[in-house]
Image (cartoon, grey):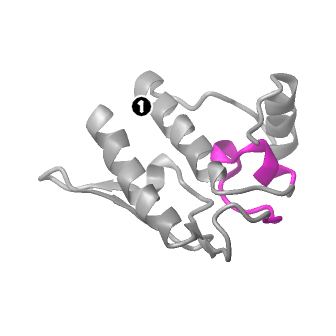
Amino acid sequence: MAYLIHEILLGLYSLHEKRQLHRDLKSDNILLSLNGVVKIADFGFAKKVNNKYSPNISCVGTPLYSSLQLLLAESYSSKVDIWAIGFIFYELLHGKTPYKAETQFQLVQNIKTQKIEIS
């Protein structure tokens, strides 16, 4: 698990250095070859930003792995990708995602009630 997260973080670092946000990191978008090569895939929601920490506002990505800022279409930064890695790590450890919800609204409410947010 440590190796996998390390490799994902290296890939994400490379993206962020190029001023790109993935915005849809999830376990389905992490590829692992038979010889241990880890790659990040599916850049359909990726976004190039002028400044690594400039505000962005849009609601994209898979809700279950999205930060509260992405879910509410509030201003966010590259930290939304780090949030998703936390979910991936949780999923690796427990075999399931941390939140279960029937609807996106319920998911947002579950995250809000725990007052989990990134700044």
Residue in the foreground of this view, choosing between 52 and 91: 52
Pinpoint residue 16: horizontal percent, then vertical percent.
52, 63
For the record, the magenta segment spans 56-72
Residue located 80% across and 49% down the image = 69
From the viewer's perspective, tell me whether residue 82 is left or right of residue 6: right
Give, as a three-letter code, the residue at label 1: Leu
Residue positioned 15% across, 52% down in the render: 34
* 40 lies above or below 85: below
Residue in front for this viewpoint, 53 or 94: 53
Q: Quadrant of residue 56?
A: bottom right
Q: Is residue 1 visible?
A: no
Q: Is residue 21 magenta?
A: no
The reply to whether residue 2 is in sight is: yes
Few, some or many residues within 10 Å of mark 1 (<14, 14–19, 20+): some
Q: Position of residue 32 (x, y in %)?
A: 27, 53
Relative to 28, residue 60 above or below:
below
How many numbered markers are drawn? 1
Foreground of the two, 95 or 55? 55
Is 87 on the left-hand or right-hand side of 49? left
Q: Quadrant of the C terminus?
A: top right
Residue 57 in the image, given as x and y percentages of width and height: 83, 64
The residue most toward the left is: 35
Element on which disc 1 rests: helix
| Relative height, residue 42 to residue 67 (above, below) | below
Side (left or right) of 83 relative to 9: right
Q: Foreground: 51 or 114? A: 51
Label 1 sits on residue: 92
Asked whether, in this view, residue 33 is left or right of residue 55, the answer is: left
Give the percent coordinates (x, y) of residue 66. Answer: 68, 48
In which quadrant of the rendered image does the N terminus lie?
Answer: top left
Point 63% across, 45% down: residue:
65
Quarter assignment of residue 61: bottom right
